Image (spheres, helix red, strand yellow):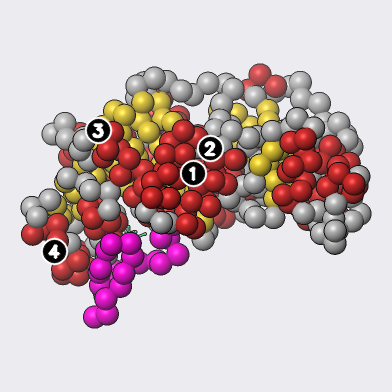
Amino acid sequence: MSQHREGKARFEIGEAFYRQTSQVGRDLAVLAARLEKSDRGSLRVLDSMAGCGVRSLRYYLEAEADWIWANEGNPDIKAVLRHNLKPLFDAGRVQLTHSDANRVFFDCYARRDYYDLVDVDSFGAPVPFLNTSLWATRLGGFVYLTSTDGRTATGHAGDQSLRVYAARTRAHPSAHEQGLRLIIGAAQQQAATKGLGVEPVFSLFSGSVYRVMLRLVKRQRLNSQNYGFLGYCHSCGEYRTLSWNDFGRVSPCPQDGTPWVVSGPMWLGALHDTAYLKRMRSLAESWGWTKRVKLLEIMEEEAELPPYFYKLGILGKRSNGDIPPRDKLIRGLRHFGYRTGRTHLDSQAIKTEASLETCVSLVIDRSSVGTSET
Ligand SMILES: C[S@@+](CC[C@H](N)C(=O)[O-])C[C@H]1O[C@@H](n2cnc3c(N)ncnc32)[C@H](O)[C@@H]1O
Ligand SMILES: [Zn+2]
């Protein structure tokens, strides 16, 4: 079998699942986990769907986890997992099981054995594990959720979003962000059923996979401001947020009178914990992870901006001109006092608190932002 490398991990894949393009999600998790280890002095990780074990290896070798429970539902890949996790077995730092993840979560709860980081790398939507993974998570610890179900998240699966998230999803240009916000919102609501809350540490969309790292906190966090709806105007491309109190008194799009197409409920609060991202970025810098440093910089910019973005192509089309240069447009909007930034979800888009009309008029006023030809 051929040897693969990722970070400090050396492993074989055999019949196990491994996707190289998901490395970015593992890298960010390792950074966050390493900081937790520094802050707490110890780190216990539950890798509930271990696949070939690359995560367990990296949490041990790079985040310096003290103890790892690696679980993988498919017993047929036991041999390759045992082989890959040999450094952890040699150090007496791991237990390996082949059980359904939900059994593992409830086993943790039954024995009051809570983990600092519970990694749930599931296929499809994460809903079968949203509530249950919290039962295995230490208060103050992290749960790292996954969705690979882009169709439901982006409004292309009809009523499936109602069944899965108890939310309506619609197709629009920033629908991948909606995918992240649906998971956070659903997890927030599930935490609330336990009298708890979750706080996003970071949210990542990469290579068609949605990942959210959440901190489980004692304080209830869900309220009618941060858990609500997103309206999109199919005529002009404008967005607005809608709260539960807006029902029955929402006026249509002010530009063209078109009724808003509404998605939600979903999380409307911050996508990331900016202070934590900064610390992750410093650590990434010290490890020489240049690509991750750049990604984290962008994530810091978008963290607290409105829950949608405008694509540059749409701004160009609306202004009957070329696609405006992103960074110049961002500088122009900031110059006029609008909080504006890049987004990791789309390199050809901006996030801003300015209206679409304001962006369009700035693009038309080429002296402010120029065009791609200037
Ligand atoms: C996306 S892969 C994991 C990949 C791995 N974590 C990585 O980073 O390369 C999902 C794994 O979870 C396992 N799995 C799926 N459903 C499960 C469940 N309910 N309980 C435990 N394992 C499960 C699958 O056999 C598969 O190996
Ligand atoms: Zn409109």
Classify mark 1: helix, strand or loop.
Answer: strand
Judged left or right of residue 108, residue 15 is right
Work out how far the residue at label 4 is from the one at label 2, CA to CA, in angstroms: 37 Å
Classify mark 2: helix, strand or loop.
Answer: loop
* Mark 2 lies on residue: 271
Judged left or right of residue 93, residue 285 is right
Q: Is residue 76 visible?
A: no
Work out how far the residue at label 1 is from the one at label 4, CA to CA, in angstroms: 32 Å
Q: Earlier in the sequence, mark 2 or mark 1?
A: 1
Judged left or right of residue 311, residue 62 is left
Vertical position of residue 173 compared to residue 194: above or below: below
Work out how far the residue at label 2 is from the one at label 3, CA to CA, in angstroms: 24 Å
* Mark 3 lies on residue: 40
Q: Are marks 2 and 1 in contact (CB under 8 Å)?
A: yes
Q: Are marks 1 and 3 in contact (CB under 8 Å)?
A: no
* Mark 1 lies on residue: 203
* Mark 4 lies on residue: 86
Amino acid type indicated by mark 3? Arg
Q: Earlier in the sequence, mark 4 or mark 3?
A: 3
Q: Earlier in the sequence, mark 1 or mark 3?
A: 3
Point out the frontmost of discs 2 and 3.
3
Q: Earlier in the sequence, mark 4 or mark 2?
A: 4
Point out the frontmost of discs 4 and 3.
3
Question: Magenta stretch containing residue 286, yes or no?
Answer: no
Residue at (50% x, 47% y) in the render: 296
Amino acid type indicated by mark 4? Lys
Q: Residues within 10 Å of mark 3 (few under 14, many from 20)?
A: few
Tell me the quarter of the image containing the C terminus: bottom right
Classify mark 4: helix, strand or loop.
Answer: helix
Q: Are marks 4 and 2 in contact (CB under 8 Å)?
A: no
Question: Magenta stretch containing residue 4, yes or no?
Answer: yes
